[in-house]
Image (cartoon, helix red, strand yellow):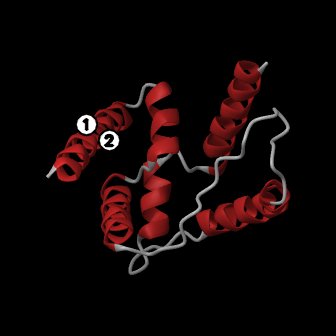
Amino acid sequence: MRILIALCSGLIFGFGLILSGMSNPVKVLGFLDLAGQWDPSLALVMVGAIATAIIPFQWVMKRQRTLLETTPQLPTSKQIDKRLLIGSLIFGTGWGIAGFCPGPALVAAGAGMPLAMLFVVAMLAGMGLFTLMDKGLKHA
C-alpha cells in the first residue's frame, strides 16, 4: 500500500511540475532573470504550493504518527550554520545555471531531455562527493 501511495504521490507531483512549467528550464531561468525579461508566473506557482502545504504541515506537526502509521520525518534543527548556507548557495547556483532543481530535473530526465539527464548525473555525482567528503571530515 505504501508503494502505491508513493507512486501516486510522485505522479501527481510530476504532473504538477509539468503543468506549472517548473520542469521547463527556460521558464525557470525567465523567473530568475530579475534584471531582464522577468517571468513572475512561477512566483504564483510557489505561493500556491505554499498555501496548499500549510494546512497539512500544521496537521502533521501536531501528530505522532502519519496516516500510514509511520513517524513523521520533519527537520528538527532551526540552526542556520555554515553548512546550511554553503549548501543553499551551491543549490541556488546550480538552479540558476541549469534552470533545474532536483524534482523538475527528474521529471524532465524521465521525459528524455538530454540536459536534464546530464543535470541528474551531475547532481548524483555531487551527492556522492559530498557523502565521501562528509565521512572523511567526520573521521578527521
Q: Tell me the residue that label 2 is attached to.
A: 123
Horizontal and vertical percent position of residue 66: 81, 41
Residue at 23% over, 51% down: 138
Q: Secondary structure at mark 2?
A: helix
- How far apart in space, not on screen, are marks 2 and 1 (Cα)? 5 Å
Q: Residue at x 65, y 50 (%)?
A: 20
- Disc 1 is placed on an element classified as helix
Quadrant of the rendered image containing residue 117:
top left
94, 72: nearer the viewer: 72
Establish if 1 lies above or below 109: above
Bin the neighbour count of mark 1 within 10 Å (Cα to Cα): few under 14, some 14-19, many 20 and up. few
Which circle marks residue 125 in the picture?
1
Image vertical order of residue 47 relative to residue 138, above or below: below
From this view, report whether residue 118 is shown above or below residue 88: above
Give the residue type that dot 1 points to: Ala
For the residues bearing labels 2 and 1, Cβ distance under 8 angstroms: yes
Tell me if 82 is positioned left or right of 48 in this view.
left
Q: Quadrant of residue 11?
A: top right
State the residue lying farthest toward the left: 140
- Left or right: residue 21 versus residue 127 is right
What is the quadrant of the N terminus in the image? Answer: top right
Residue 13 badge: none
Image: 80 above or below 8: below
Q: Amino acid at mark 2?
A: Met
Image position, residue 77 (x, y; %)? 53, 66
Name the foreground residue: 36 vs 61: 61
Q: Nearer the viewer, residue 59 or 104?
A: 59
Q: Residue 12 placed where, x, y %?
A: 72, 35
Label 2 neighbour load within 10 Å: few <14, some 14-19, many 20+: some
User: Where residue 27 sits in the image (x, y, percent)?
Assistant: 50, 56
Residue displayed at 34% across by 62% down? 87
Q: Residue at x 30, y 33 (%)?
A: 121
